[in-house]
Image (cartoon, grey):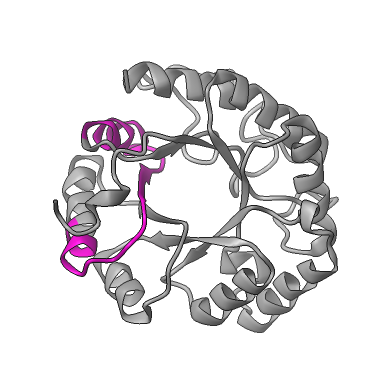
Amino acid sequence: MRPGKAGRGLTMIKACLNGGRAPGDHPALPLTPLELAEAAREAREAGAAAVHMHPRDEAGRESLSADHIGAAVRAVRMACPGLPVGVSTGLWMTGGDVDARREAVLGWAALPARDRPDFASVNLSEPGFPDLWHHLRRLGVDVEAGVWSVGDAEALAATGLECVRILVEIIGGAADTAVSRAHAVLGRLDELAVPGPRLLHGEEGPAWILLEEAGHLGLATRIGLEDVLHSPEGDPVAGNADLVRLALARRV
């Protein structure tokens, strides 16, 4: 068994409901807590095993404030009892301000445990990730490590931090190199014996290519309006649940 192989074989599909998409990017893009809850319910019925979302403020902007995180998580939990729910901690949400992000996340301590997410993604390419990681764990929130490159894989190994899941995220670049770039990252994680289940996904052009590759490798993956707005054939999709159904059909 290759190092890190124990995490493989987990064929979970997580629905990424909205990401940083702007209002109007898709007719079914969920932004409000009630919209996120309905999208999560539909995605779960379509076969998603977890959801990932970017809660918004009243103007539709991505937010890490306790008020917006708590409202979105609460709505999803009410609509989908037992469904694991996660959020992003992308540094862009605080304009690149590490201190503002830390203070926003520390504010989650004021939320009842039931209104905190089950997990949060932390990008290894962003400054301040080790401290953020520890703050999340003290809040009872599991960490998904966002690994975008071989360098990120090496940074994760150097920390010795453990996570609930490693997100191998192939962001940008040409679609025809996406698989080779994914294998470079996965291979480096294995070489360094980094523990934790792997989830492989891409965005836009490589999204469907990498979803199929995840299936070939027996890895978890994700799909949703955050990552792609069209079917593998390039047709428009109705929403997140439609994408989940298409994804499951391609992984049989």
Residue 46 on image: x %, y %? 56, 19
Q: Quadrant of residue 90?
A: bottom right
In the rendered image, the vertical position of residue 193 relative to residue 44, given as above or below: below
Is 156 included in the stretch rendered in magenta? Answer: no
Q: Residue at x 83, y 49 (%)?
A: 71
* Magenta stretch, residue numbers: 187-216
Q: In front here: 218 or 82?
A: 82
Task: Please state if 28 lies on the left or on the right of 57 as rendered.
Answer: left
Q: Residue at x 79, y 70 (%)?
A: 109
Residue 54 on image: x %, y %? 65, 50
Q: Residue at x 29, y 68 (%)?
A: 153
Task: Please state if 237 lies on the left or on the right of 197 as rendered.
Answer: right
Q: In front here: 97 or 248?
A: 248
Residue 88 on image: x %, y %? 59, 57
Residue 240 on image: x %, y %? 58, 27
Is 204 included in the stretch rendered in magenta? Answer: yes
